[in-house]
Image (cartoon, grey):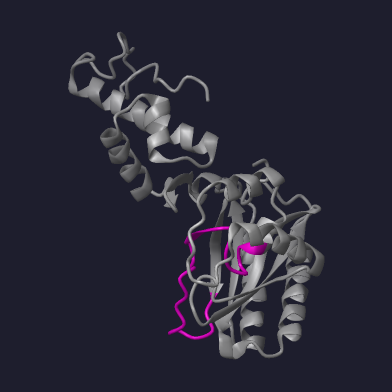
Amino acid sequence: MSDIRPKADPNGRPISGGAASSGGAGGTGGAAYKSLHRGLEILQLIQGRGRLKISEVSSELGMPLSTVYRYVTVLRDAGFAIEIDGYLMPSSRLAESDDASPHLVRYAAPVLRRLRELTGMTAILAVRVHITAVCLEVSYAHPQHRIPFGRGKVRSLYAGATALPLLAYAPKKVVRELLSGGLRAYTTATMSPEMIEPYLRQVRAEGHAVSYGQITPGMVGIGVPVFAGGRVLCSLSLVGDERQTGALDERVALLKQGAAELAAKLPSNVDLEVWSDQSA
């Protein structure tokens, strides 16, 4: 990142001696500037590294842990950072597009609705951001069906049929980074680190993922990747209770049809970097 220090105050007056106002470095303006600079340093580090602990932020920037905790709380509350399994990561807000092209959700919404109507299950659209899965949209099977992974929620990539197709096609270094950290078991059905890579190969071979109670006991999920430009842009999934595990092959086929339909709707110049950090 280039030099982030302002060259003038909001009134256009030159800044000298590192102060952000005529009050000087020791005044209110100087303190505000220093606070802003620290916050931007932390945000830059989180965005650049993708995943790190609060203690690592403290060590790398030479800030007391208590100070880092205060800034991280502000960044998290503002939606710029998230914390999963003890690690800080940039939020999906940092990956949002500023162009005028229709949002991915707009293309996916009719596909999600039809999947829900045909199966009676909740349909989900998700993308990968760094080493997390972010839910962009949900079409609920019924108003009372409130699943933990709702719109705007963030989850680790290693559990659940919504996230696993995204991990299966992520760059190898993303998989290595994820498996190198501590993986929390959501339930007794959550896969161990040793089980994940073999299962990812199975997902790539079969073109879909199935999970039973990996996130929530008694729930089943089926997910498929959606390809654009030869890479995975997002995933489509169906989630319901285990009583809905019948006709699995039919539901996998419906998901794959939905993925093909969504891919065909996308413009040829779709920006894969907007929602997926493909460079990670």
Q: Establish if 45 lies above or below 225.
A: above
- State the image coordinates of residue 21 (x, y, percent, origin top left): 25, 18
Q: Main secondary structure of the magenta part?
A: loop
Look at the image and give the residue range highlighted in magenta: 139-164
27 or 194: which is nearer to us? 194
For residue 50, side relative to residue 62 (left or right): right
Residue at 39% across, 26% down: 61
Q: Establish if 52 lies above or below 135.
A: above
Residue at 38% across, 39% down: 54
For residue 15, side relative to residue 273 (left or right): left
Q: Establish if 34 lies above or below 79.
A: above
- State the image coordinates of residue 247 (x, y, percent, origin top left): 71, 89
Q: Quadrant of residue 234?
A: bottom right
For residue 167, side relative to residue 30 (left or right): right
- State the image coordinates of residue 275 (x, y, percent, origin top left): 61, 51
84 or 26: which is nearer to us? 84
Residue at 35% across, 41% down: 72
